[in-house]
Amino acid sequence: MELRNYRDADEDALADLWQRCDLMRNPLNDAHKDIAFCLSGGHGEILILEDEGEIVASAMLGQDGHRGWIYYVAVDPARQGQDLGRRIMAAAEARLQASGVPKVQLLVRGSNTQVVGFYQRLGYMMDPANLMSRRLDGNPLPIGHQMNDEPVIVTYLEMLERGSLPHIVPKTRNHALIGAHDITVGFYRYLYDAVGRPWYWTDRKKLSDAELATIIQDEAVETYVLYVGGVPAGFYELDFRTMPTAELAYFGIMPEFIGMGLGPYLLGQALDMLWHKEPARVLVNTCTLDHPKALPLYQRFGFRPYDQQKVPAPWQDVNNVLDFA
Ligand SMILES: CC(C)(COP(=O)(O)OP(=O)(O)OC[C@H]1O[C@@H](n2cnc3c(N)ncnc32)[C@H](O)[C@@H]1OP(=O)(O)O)[C@@H](O)C(=O)NCCC(=O)NCCS
């Protein structure tokens, strides 16, 4: 295995590696242009790990006169889990250290939650800083999986009678659903961010601690937390403040627990509790930024859409909380 600098002949293979590693989601990033720009000004370099003529890993690095940065860390999907990520990162760090920068930084896309564990394993920590950015090329800022400027469509759904709710038993045996009475603001903010971050939930982040406490600690608002193996895995919030209309205000599973069949179970429990208080109407809403299965799931449980509205995407709202880079 050879560690070396990028050569012109690598261009197509490197672009292909980044594509296969799902690093090219942002349509404003063009691999060929990014490679050329990195190497054009003497401010950056690209490291390659090559094995038997194949590029198996890459890292782009550079220093901006103050800090070191690492981009495009990628390991061939067929070769992941073999320490190549660690090796290419160690090589990139060594180069930056040699250049004299005291700190190395990197950006992890908000939706790339899996990779955070890799960097943590290498000693990286989340900085308590908000990344703010502004494009200088006139392009709109595309973030996350909605890569265009289209407005978000919110679908409002209602249920007017209990109906027969499907009985769902989750596959996990070690789960528990516990009401969080007098929930603290800190715990609530953790739940909201852990569930909502991939889906750009921002409404509650705009509230001060006092404003948030007024809502979540209201006697007519109830939060239930799903634990799997003692670890928070999801939550829902029921709002009875406008009875006889009740609302499933928030509902979701944390990314690490998606795909385990917990969503239908949790929704069934939430609806059971909502109807237990005998409301005349139960509301929920979902938008095109939510998990694509959310809307069909609500409909499967008996919700019917009664309205739709277009709203600006969270990143188009200048007053928004800018923490989903
Ligand atoms: C992230 C990536 C570079 C990791 O490379 P890799 O070769 O699979 O990782 P390594 O085998 O070197 O793993 C090093 C350590 O991190 C751990 N690790 C790797 N991926 C992990 C993950 N997703 N979550 C938690 N730990 C992880 C490994 O278990 C290993 O731990 P150890 O100290 O117990 O041995 C690779 O998965 C990748 O290319 N992903 C797609 C592209 C991407 O997301 N890049 C990052 C952009 S910010």
Image (spheres, rainbow, N blue to C red):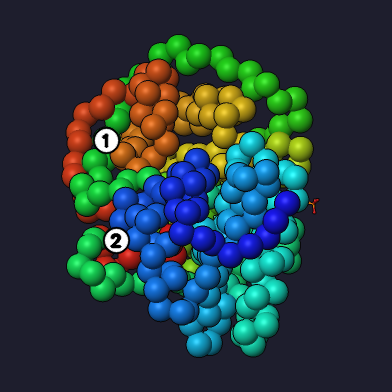
Q: Residue at x 68, y 60 (%)?
A: 3
Question: Which numbered marker is on residue 69?
Answer: none
x, y percentage for residue 63?
53, 80
Image: 98 above or below 320: below
Image: 320 above or below 32: below
Which class describes the residues within 10 Å of circle 1: few (<14), some (14-19), or many (20+)? Answer: some
* Location of residue 139 (image quadrant): bottom left
Q: Name the foreground residue: 265 vs 137.
A: 137
* Location of residue 138 (image quadrant): bottom left
Q: Name the foreground residue: 224 vs 107.
A: 107
Of marks 1 and 2, the one in the foreground? 2
Q: Residue at x 50, y 53 (%)?
A: 10
Closer to the chain start, of discs 1 and 2, is 2
* Location of residue 187 (image quadrant): bottom right
Image: 101 above or below 135: below
Which class describes the residues within 10 Å of circle 2: few (<14), some (14-19), or many (20+)? Answer: some
Q: Secondary structure at mark 1?
A: strand
Q: Residue at x 60, y 39 (%)?
A: 77
Task: For marks 1 and 2, give the CA distance.
Answer: 25 Å
Q: Residue at x 20, y 36 (%)?
A: 308
Asked whether residue 217 is in view, the answer is no
For badge 1, the amino acid type reads: Thr
Q: Secondary structure at mark 2?
A: loop
For badge 2, the amino acid type reads: Leu
x, y percentage for residue 221?
48, 47
- What residue is disc 2 on? 141
Question: Which numbered marker is on residue 155?
Answer: 1
